Amino acid sequence: MFQYEIKDSNITVEELLRNHWRLGKKLVHELRMAKAVTTIDGEPLLWKEPLPAGTMLKFTFPIPASSYKPTPVCAIDVVYEDDHCLIVSKPKGMSTHPNDDHDTHTCMNHVMAHMKEQGLHYAEHVHRLDKGTEGLLLVAKHPLAKSIFDRMIEEKTIIRTYAAEVQGNLRSTSGTIAESIGKDRHHPTRRVVSNTGQHAVTHYEVVARYKHSCVVHLVLETGRTHQIRVHLAHIGHPIIGDTMYGARETASGDYELHAIQLELEHPFLNKLILVKDES
């Protein structure tokens, strides 16, 4: 399945799984029962035996099949890939994942076509992008990676940066929008700033100014539905073309929001991964 090199001396397998990767009790138990962790030669290991730095571990465990139906070919760009994850560039106008059985041309359907080409059958998105948003999407290639990346999203250690051109010029060069977001009772899909909504935080920085607009880079601390769109509209600067949130319509009839960068400390490779979308 994959190999892992122990980084620090005197770490046990149990400490690696529970304290470093902080896997759930159920998942750790399943790995123990499956005898999933061995030496590189496949020899069994004592889970509470300290191991020297540089020890190579081999992880082998059953992986369930994801439910997404693969498209005939993968028609999206894979920007980064290793044994544990891949990062794809989702096109504008494509949903992240299916909402029903008839929805078979989403980003995850294309990802499954890519996985099928490699003889693999598991892929799960770690976060999601709105249909109208293009850019980088992180996908886990096995359940351990999914569990760890989900926790990293919750703990805000995966840094997601977006770019948008907004109406008007923000007065401040940088700032933070911390307003809770909830559903709009008067619209089936729109969201609004609401005291009873979910906690949401967006950081922004103006990177270019024009006569009637400016370009901002935004970093999400939380990942609520339509978060960037709602927050920018709330401060009076909706994304150009985002008519749902009060912007003027453009010739294309669409808005421009681009997930341009993903940055994370890779839990399996023990190094910083920084991926940019140059499209």
Image: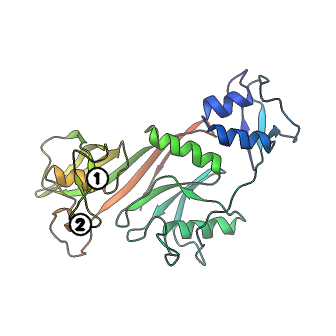
| Local crowd size for mark 1, using a 10 Å CA cut-off: few (<14), some (14–19), many (≥20) | many
Question: Residue at image x 68%, y 69%?
Answer: 117
Look at label 2 and name its amino acid.
His
Q: Which mark is residue 158?
A: none
- Judging from the image, what secondary structure is the residue with disc 2 in? loop
Q: Position of residue 158 (x, y in %)?
A: 46, 42
Q: Position of residue 41 (x, y in %)?
A: 88, 41
Q: Which residue is mark 1?
A: 228
Report the side of 26 relative to 152 (left or right).
Answer: right
Instruction: Give the answer, above or below, for where 40 lies relative to 276.
Output: above
Question: Residue at image x 19%, y 67%?
Answer: 243
Q: Which residue is mark 2?
A: 187
Mark pair 2, 1: CA separation: 18 Å
Answer yes or no: is residue 36 visible.
no
Of labels 2 and 1, earlier in sequence is: 2
Look at label 1 and name its amino acid.
Ile
